[in-house]
Image (cartoon, helix red, strand yellow):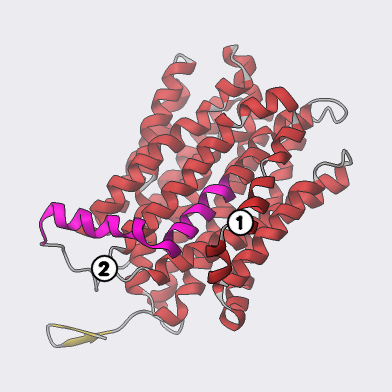
Amino acid sequence: MKDFGGKKEKPYTPKEPAFWRVTIALMLASLLVFSTLYVFQPLLPVFVDEFQVTATQSSLLVSSAVISMVVGLFILGFMADRYGRLLLMHVSLGMTVLLLFAMPFTPSFEALVGLRLLQGFFLAGVPAAAMGYLGEEVSPQHLGLAVTLYISSNALGGMGGRVVAGYLTDVLDWNTTLLFMSGFGIVSAGLFILLLPKERFYVKQNTPLRKDLQGMLVHLKDTHMLVLFLMGLLLQIVFTAVWTYLPFYLQAEPFNWPLTWISFTYFAYGFGVLAPPLAGRLSVKIGLPKVMIAGLFVLLTGVWMTALPMPPVILIGLGVICMGFFVAHSMAAALVSKTASHHRSGASGFYLISYYIGVAIGSTAIGALWEQFMWWGIIATSLVFIVVIAFIPMYKKMT
């Protein structure tokens, strides 16, 4: 509890309406950010035909935004800790929507990639600041609930963006799809601004810039933090590789699925929406690290299920993948926020930087494995987790 001009303030709990205002506002922002980030993923085969580029080149529409998002997470995460989080998130969402609206009018593939590169930087604003905001404004006892609901909306946004984009593009065209997403962005950003309460516990940093930067970089010397950063990196390499090359896999023999059918596979993200809150409750009893590792093994099981060329097994495997991924990710994110005693946005920023480097690797760099070994090359990326868990003792210390 803190004293503000004689008025006692305490962090929000689920018994207060403000807790749910915070949660709903950040969920809306998350829906906008992650539907925008992944809206191009199911459309990559469309751009191969539209602009006469390769599958790996078309994946730049995902990885270009991710690369600049990594830069944005570092810069904006540092700015959020130093100058405050609310205004930064407002500007971030505004620029995201503006750039999304401009994309349907781009004349070339190169121009579209350029806009995505710029958009990625602003997409980083909400992820860079949200965890720090929650860490300060929400009661520590209920932080796991708030974080898992926020992470669930990450999954819902990713699912909605992919499903809507795939369906509308198959029925209409990709330009109309992006205009529709822009309209959704305007509504979501407006509601976010109206709902999210002002920061109460944030204290503006008056320390010298160099010293403040050193305080943020100290997270890179913490072995427990490094384990969590590594977790984010590897999780996304595996997860993104599966979902980036899934449309190519299912369009080819022996499946020959149309884009509409493929877009419906993203409903598997529903498991990613439901699983984290349940995992959050379980983590209260057995601890965040154990639930995180359990989620990881669920993810790996799902990946290997897709090796069987049987549509029902593949569909079940995709649901298992989403459930395991979002459980492991939400637990790792909560551990980062809980472990950091200072520069919380910076710590979350480093986690997300590693997380989105994994997106870039899983989307474009893994393309070489796809072109050489097809789906078996994608599945093989999951083997690295087995090696890491077996030979890095820091994992064992966490549990």
Image location (x, y in percent) of residue 257: 81, 30
Amino acid beneath label 1: Phe
Q: Earlier in the sequence, mark 1 or mark 2?
A: 2
Quick check: 386 left or right of 249? left
Label 2 element class = loop
Residue topped by disc 2: 199
Q: Callout 2 environment at 10 Å: few (<14), some (14 to 19), or many (20+)?
A: some
Element type at marker 1? Answer: helix
- Residue 257 visible? The answer is yes
Q: Is residue 396 above or below residue 210?
A: below
Residue labelled with disc 1? 391
> Is residue 228 in the magenta section?
yes
Query: Where the N terminus falls, by quadrant?
Result: bottom left
Spatial distance from mark 1 to mark 2, Cα to Cα? Answer: 43 Å
Q: Nearer the viewer, residue 131 or 33?
A: 131
Q: Is residue 271 visible?
A: no
In the rendered view, tell whether residue 105 sits above or below residue 247: above
The image position of residue 276, as x and y in percent, is 60, 66
Task: Confirm whether the magenta stretch covers residue 204.
Answer: no
Q: Choose top left, top right, bottom left or bottom right for residue 324.
A: bottom right
Is the C-beta separation of discs 1 and 2 under 8 Å? Answer: no
Residue 10 on image: x %, y %: 30, 83
Drawn side of residue 4 relative to residue 64, left or right: left
Main SS type for the magenta part?
helix
Q: Nearer the viewer, mark 1 or mark 2?
A: 1
Callout 1: few (<14), some (14-19), or many (20+) C-alpha neighbours within 10 Å? Answer: few
Query: What residue appears at the point 24 percent right and 73 percent down from the top-left corner?
Result: 201
Is 252 positioned to the left or the right of 201 in the image? right
Amino acid under disc 2: Glu
Report the number of discs.
2
| Range shown magenta | 207-236
Could you say which quadrant of the image residue 58 lies in?
A: top right
